[in-house]
């Protein structure tokens, strides 16, 4: 055996061993896409305007507090837009004091004074910061909720720097439940009930002369949890979901599922004071603007309490989970959903494998039938090609998941990998026909076909690269297997196949005919 | 063994016929796309909902159409036996806040409409749906009565439901003991659960915003791939070859889309990937022939250009036949066995392999010929 043949054989052997080592056992080493494994892919958008609007609301409250504290006169502060508000009818003698106040405490806001109205709007930089913050917070909250669910290998990513969050959850069995858990804003508030319940708003306001008092607002009971009546509740919430340190499923006094919560120490003190001041008055628990429960304050409550309502076991579990994970800073909406059940994924794997095996068998039969012994050459190259493809897929792991279109890509690779062999074999036949000896025909065949193989494969890879670049999800899976497969096929069809020819020829007598 | 022994077909003689054939198909296709039925975009591009549902009991497709009439969905039976269907519904296209989420609501609505009345009553009575329950929930139901290895019992029940045999829905409680679940557990489940009338096996919903974006990205991928390949040929061959290749590829894309416009298949993301694959494949074929032409021009200086083209096609004919044949074989296996998810893709590639083979002989070479005739009537292509 020639020296370079020995080195080449060792190299190929090493590659085989490495590929087997990397990809065995394939069921553990190759990462499957959601379409094969079953699971859920969600693209959701954080409505960042919500976060701005909430922030504006809070700032108005803060401003009013400051204005009163500093004894500055004004009629009202009204919200004019998502991030705009105005102070009406100020006392022009106090103009400078108001300016000083805004300069000192409201640095993120621009203001202008026309007549006796001060228009205040959020600075663009601050608005962008808040939007960005709300997306980051939303991502974190969703991450917490998903972690609480205890699902295997979840991925939660922000798409670039935009408002979108991509959630990928393999093995999800009940997509609707997860979607609800993720989407609930979970803004929990305890507020004093000032009136109600009433069947409609007019009845509710009858005693008040049809006007909603300035420190109150109307809320409706959640249709799934209460009778759905209208209540008048205080605007201020002494305690909110942010003050929770723990929540878990428990049972109420009638042994129905309920949620037990624990407040942090500071909020506990506040709540104790509040319940002491309002003993025997009704208190409402409001989740995302809907009243869940109204109950009388029978006792002073400090740091522990119960949310009753009519929950099923699972609903109580989910609410406790959401409360533990904290509220979303803004509401979210689903832009895209792809959920695949586990049975369908398994089905796709079976079908994909079946198609693959049939394709390989057909090609092997054809190549051996058409090119005789040299056909085995091609078959060996093809087998190694698939092995290398598996090895690289396993090595890349999460960066190259196998999807159903990916399996299609492998099948297509098999079809196209044969082409490189065919190009070489046809050239060798031509060279033999022109009267060359076996060895020089092989040599000329390979070297003349090389250029063609390169050009042909590079163009396919170019197409695949753009598919990868602009494609999404499953399509990327297709591009990945195609790129890896075609690259591997150039190696196997040119290098490995040549090596097998050289090895077999080196053992034969010079005049023996090539079986092709 | 050989397919062709010393082939010597005069391909170029019939180039006009080929142009006429392609011209007719593409013109008919373009007319159909612009004035007629047109291409049907899948939910990936239009936005909408796709749901794959399996019913516990056979549900005839005509009845299903009737029940869902208000939504005007497209319904396709997945498997013989009137049990499993793919239901597609487009969502209204619009800019309002509600339209952005219509795709999601539509999915819920379809399931709602199809859910049997018994199921609703059972849920109101506090029973859980064993066809749609997840392992967690099942575990918590079993917990009180079977505190030992609860999770394993729950897991094996769910695994049974998702197995090859049951395909996602439990048809009767008798199936549980047969598969090795304790009779005791089965009896307990009979009291606490019910067998829902349907199971949702797949749900994809795409909002209009994402649909537009996917469309844009698919177009970008196609255009950039074409430019990239053009650039590569320009680098490796002469300008005329690049033009001929691009005309051929454009022909392939138009031809495939034309055929598509006469079928009921939808253009979705996998189909776009398939079209790009065809483009790569067809170019592959074209390059092999051009490569020969380039070689032969040097060797056959005194021959007519048409003669050189014919020679080159004949010399590579075996290879063309074998590669097209093997590629066709593999894609055909995919078409037969790959399942409905990949079926549109496989169909597109099958058409593409045929068109690509035809076009590399009957489009790329004639284009090269006419280019030569118009721009270099005396000198020939060699220089």
Image: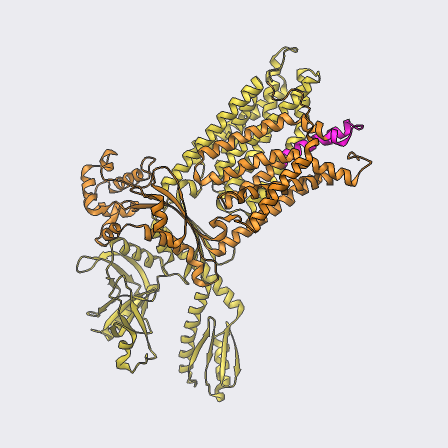
Relative to A378, say whether B343 is above or below.
below
Question: Residue sitting at 29 percent across and 58 percent down?
Answer: A247
Q: Can you tell which chain is drawn yellow?
A: A
Horizontal side, residue B249 vs residue A40: left or right: right
From the top left corner, tell me how far across and down residue A424 is, in percent: 63, 25
Q: Camera-side residue: B104 or B20?
A: B20
Horizontal side, residue B216 vs residue A37: left or right: right
The colour one sees for chain B in the rendered image is orange
Can I make out residue B273 in this image? yes
From the top left corner, tell me how far across and down residue A102 is, in percent: 49, 78
Horizontal side, residue B156 vs residue B77: left or right: left
* Quarter-of-image position of residue A142: bottom left
Q: Is residue A467 magenta?
A: no
Q: Indicate how the structure is coloured in the image.
A: by chain
Question: Residue sitting at 24 percent across and 33 percent down?
Answer: B178
Q: Residue furthest bottom?
A: A93
Q: Is residue B292 magenta?
A: yes
Relative to A441, say whether B370 is above or below.
below
Report the magenta residues as a range.
Answer: B283-308
The quadrant of the picture occupied by the C terminus of chain B is: top right
Can I make out residue A402 in this image? no
Specify the principal SS of the magenta part: helix
From the top left corner, tell me how far across and down residue A353 is, in percent: 44, 32
């Amino acid at each position: 055996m020639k020296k370079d043949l020995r080195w080449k054989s060792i190299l190929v052997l090493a590659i085989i061993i490495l590929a087997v080592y990397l990809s065995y056992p394939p069921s553990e080493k190759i990462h499957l896409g959601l379409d094969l494994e079953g699971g859920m892919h969600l693209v959701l958008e954080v409505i960042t305007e919500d976060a701005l609007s909430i922030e504006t609301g809070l700032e108005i409250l803060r401003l009013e507090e400051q204005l009163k504290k500093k004894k500055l006169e004004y009629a009202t502060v009204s919200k004019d837009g998502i991030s705009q508000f105005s102070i009406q009818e100020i006392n022009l003698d106090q103009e400078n004091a108001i300016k000083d106040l805004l300069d000192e405490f409201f640095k993120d806001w621009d203001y202008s004074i026309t007549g006796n109205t001060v228009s205040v709007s959020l600075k663009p930089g601050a608005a962008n910061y808040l939007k960005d913050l709300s997306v980051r917070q939303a991502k974190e909250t969703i991450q917490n909720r998903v972690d609480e669910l205890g699902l295997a290998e979840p991925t939660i990513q922000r798409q670039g720097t935009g408002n979108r969050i991509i959630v990928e959850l393999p093995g999800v069995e009940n997509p609707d439940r997860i979607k609800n858990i993720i989407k609930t804003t979970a803004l929990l508030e305890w507020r004093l009930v000032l009136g109600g319940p009433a069947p409609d708003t007019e009845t509710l306001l009858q005693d008040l002369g049809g006007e909603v008092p300035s420190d109150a607002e109307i809320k409706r009971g959640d249709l799934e949890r209460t009778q759905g009546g209208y209540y008048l509740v205080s605007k201020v919430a002494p305690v909110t979901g942010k003050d929770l340190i723990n929540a878990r499923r428990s049972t109420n006094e009638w042994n129905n599922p309920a949620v037990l919560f624990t407040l942090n120490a500071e909020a506990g003190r506040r709540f104790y004071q509040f319940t002491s001041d309002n003993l025997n008055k009704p208190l409402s628990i409001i989740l995302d603007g809907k009243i869940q429960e109204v109950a009388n304050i029978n006792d002073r409550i400090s740091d522990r309490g119960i949310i009753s309502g009519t929950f099923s076991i699972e609903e109580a579990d989910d609410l406790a989970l959401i409360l533990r994970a904290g509220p979303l800073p803004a509401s979210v909406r689903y832009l895209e959903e792809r959920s695949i059940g586990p049975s369908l994924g398994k089905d796709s794997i079976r079908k994909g494998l079946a198609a693959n095996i049939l394709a390989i068998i057909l090609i092997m039969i054809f190549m051996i039938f058409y090119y005789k012994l040299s056909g085995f050459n091609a078959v060996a190259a093809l087998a190694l090609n698939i092995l290398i493809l598996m090895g690289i897929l396993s090595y890349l792991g999460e960066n190259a998941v196998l999807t159903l279109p990916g399996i299609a890509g492998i099948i297509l690779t098999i079809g196209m990998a044969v082409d490189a062999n065919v190009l070489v074999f046809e050239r060798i036949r031509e060279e033999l026909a022109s009267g060359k000896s076996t060895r020089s025909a092989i040599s000329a065949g390979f070297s003349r076909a090389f250029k063609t193989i390169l050009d042909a494969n590079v163009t396919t890879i170019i197409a695949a690269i753009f598919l990868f670049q602009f494609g999404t999800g499953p399509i990327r899976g297709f591009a990945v297997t195609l790129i890896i497969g075609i690259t591997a096929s150039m190696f196997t069809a040119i290098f490995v196949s040549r090596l097998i020819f050289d090895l077999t020829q080196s053992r034969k007598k010079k005049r023996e005919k090539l079986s092709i | 063994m050989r397919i062709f022994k010393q082939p010597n077909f005069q391909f170029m003689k019939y180039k006009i016929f080929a142009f006429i054939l392609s011209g007719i198909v593409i013109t008919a296709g373009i007319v159909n796309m612009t004035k007629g039925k047109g291409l049907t975009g899948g939910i990936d591009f239009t936005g909408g909902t796709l749901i794959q549902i399996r019913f516990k009991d056979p549900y005839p497709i005509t009845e299903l159409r009737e029940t869902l009439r208000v939504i005007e969905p497209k319904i396709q039976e997945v498997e013989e036996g009137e049990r499993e269907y793919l239901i597609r519904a487009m969502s209204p296209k619009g800019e309002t806040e509600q339209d952005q989420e219509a795709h999601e609501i539509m999915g819920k609505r379809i399931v709602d409409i199809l859910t049997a009345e018994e199921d609703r009553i059972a849920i109101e009575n506090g029973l859980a749906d064993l066809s749609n329950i997840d392992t967690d929930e099942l575990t918590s139901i079993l917990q009180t009565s079977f505190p030992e290895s609860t999770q394993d019992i729950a897991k094996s029940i769910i695994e049974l439901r998702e197995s090859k045999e049951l395909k996602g829905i439990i048809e009767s409680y008798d199936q549980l003991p047969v598969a090795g679940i304790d009779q005791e557990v089965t009896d307990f489940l009979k009291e606490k659960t019910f067998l829902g009338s349907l199971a949702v096996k797949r749900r994809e919903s795409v909002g209009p915003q994402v649909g537009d974006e996917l469309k844009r990205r698919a177009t970008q991928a196609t255009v950039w791939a074409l430019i990239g390949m053009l650039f590569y040929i320009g680098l490796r061959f002469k300008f005329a070859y690049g033009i001929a290749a691009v005309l051929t590829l454009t022909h392939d894309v138009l031809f495939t889309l034309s055929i598509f416009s006469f079928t009921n298949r939808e253009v979705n993301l996998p189909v776009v990937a398939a079209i790009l694959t065809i483009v790569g494949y067809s170019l592959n074929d074209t390059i092999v022939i051009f490569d020969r032409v380039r070689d032969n021009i040097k060797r056959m200086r005194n021959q007519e250009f048409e003669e050189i083209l014919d020679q080159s096609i004949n010399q590579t004919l075996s290879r063309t036949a074998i590669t097209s044949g093997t590629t066709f074989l593999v894609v055909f296996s995919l078409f037969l066995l790959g399942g409905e998810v990949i079926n549109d893709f496989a169909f597109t590639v099958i058409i593409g392999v045929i068109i690509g083979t035809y076009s590399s002989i009957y489009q790329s070479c004639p284009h090269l010929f006419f280019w030569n005739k118009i721009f270099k009537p005396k000198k020939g292509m060699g220089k």
